[in-house]
Amino acid sequence: MNDQTKKLKLEFFNKLLEANPQIKAQYDEYAASVFSLESMSGKTEAYINEVAREIQDELEEIDFTDFDWEFYTPRHSGYIPEYEAMGHMAEDKVEEFFSGLEDTFETDLVQGKTARALLFLVAVYDACIEAEINDEYCTLPDDNEYLLNQLQELQEKIIQSLSKQVIPGNSYRDFLEGLCTHYRQHYETDDQYLRFFEPLLLSLTANKEMAAITGEVIQAFRIPNQQLPRLLTKIHSLTGNIETWVHTSEQVLEHDSEVALKLLEHYHKTDYNRLVSTGEKLWNNNRFKKETAQLLYKTIDPEASPDFYKRVISFLTGQNRTVKYYKELREFLTEKEKEDFINKHYNDNKFYSMMLHVENRHEELLHYIRKNKDSWNFNNIVQYILEPFPGESFSLLKEKILKKIENERGRYVYQEVASWLNIALKIKSKNANARELILKLYHHKPNLPALKDEFRQAGLV
């Protein structure tokens, strides 16, 4: 690059900074960080405590007992009970308060005070859990927990803002050391404290430089691996040390589903035996079955690992309750195991009926449907006996239809009747009987205009 090109770039950069105050503030902070002109090192705990007290006082001053009904905007049309409306107004007050906190954060960020802005969030956390909210009518559900949920939403917005920022390494180090110091002094026994801020730390640890800083600070403060499982594994992933990443992931996989999944995916590509042993370890300790079941189902060889595969497919069948999984599961079960599995789901009308249908136990299924003819799933389960028992199916449907028309009125009733008649029309040998029943009901005396309308809409006439 020649001198003229360098000069041109510097002129352009200066004009860019002059035209964009926010970018200039980022540059000033970055330059200050490089030349060590400004640092919050050693001042973080005092700052957090001071700001936390201020925010706590402000939270405790919010009055959740006196609302300005004149400016209340209903969330929906129709009747709204007073307690629900008060809850809406209480939520509005909290939302307005956190909007102000977001403005404070953004102001510090625009001014290039990154460490201060990030530590502000740490202070807000303290205030949220310590504040004694004036809410005698319980307008907010679990006041302090509700505030933490709002802070979590604020943190997500801030993560988006930070993605457009250039974060100086020294500012990040100041923040991380301040967070770890605060953790050591106040939250060592709280397993969820650092996990709360882990999404923020993950977004900030975006490259090798930040990963190195994060690793150094966490090691210096002897932060337990299980406190920040995703962050630790990301550090080793960014530094490219696969062996260390695997070792760390194995240590913390029972503490985080995402870490467990990534390690299982790695073993799927590199070591089948470790894939199975790691999966079995998780399942034996009842960890992340729901999260890992699909991956294990797709990657475990049923011939090489039949017992574990059977556990996985059994779990998926119980979770999803579909024909696909049940048909596969039944091939791995003994007759007794199959019977036990079916009986275990006796009270799930839809799933139980589907399994009896797959097993071709239709007489048993007919008896079961008769006992459960008032089930919400009747329309689904009766489908299984239309072919094997056309006469019995039609009789069941006709009985329900006539009973409904005799005892009830209304659009919903007529829609339900129409759905049963459409099912009856599927029974080929009883099609004429179904048509006869439709005409009889259509000309019902006394006249039922709404029923006729529903029949027309359902395509019955």
Image: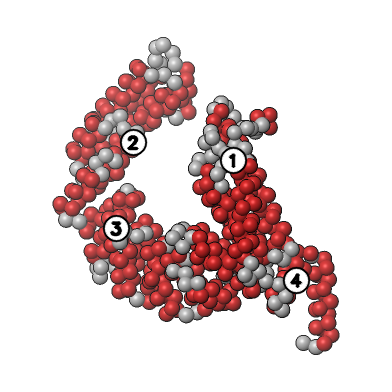
Amino acid type shown at disc 4 = Asp
Q: Reading the chain from its start, which is encountered first: label 4 or label 1?
A: 4
Taking the spot 82% from the left edge, 87% from the top edge, the residue there is: 3
Q: Reading the chain from its start, which is encountered first: label 3 or label 4?
A: 4
Q: Quadrant of the N terminus?
A: bottom right
Residue 294 seen: no
Q: Reading the chain from its start, which is encountered first: label 2 or label 4?
A: 4
Amino acid type shown at disc 1 = Glu
Separation (CA) of disc 1 from disc 3: 44 Å
Q: Depth check: give the residue in front, 409 or 358.
A: 409
Q: Quadrant of residue 307?
A: bottom left
Taking the spot 63% from the left edge, 74% from the top edge, the residue there is: 169
Q: Nearer the viewer, mark 1 or mark 3?
A: 1
Give me the disc on residue 313: 3
Q: Depth check: give the residue in front, 100 or 316.
A: 100
Q: Which residue is mark 1?
A: 91
Q: Does the residue at mark 4 contact the one at mark 1 (Cβ under 8 Å)?
A: no
Vertical relation: 186 (above or below) 7: above
Give me the disc on residue 28: 4
Q: Nearer the viewer, mark 2 or mark 1?
A: 1
Q: Reading the chain from its start, which is encountered first: label 1 or label 3?
A: 1
Give me the disc on residue 377: 2
Q: Nearer the viewer, mark 2 or mark 4?
A: 4
Separation (CA) of disc 3 from disc 4: 58 Å
The spot of residue 189 in percent (x, y) is 44, 60
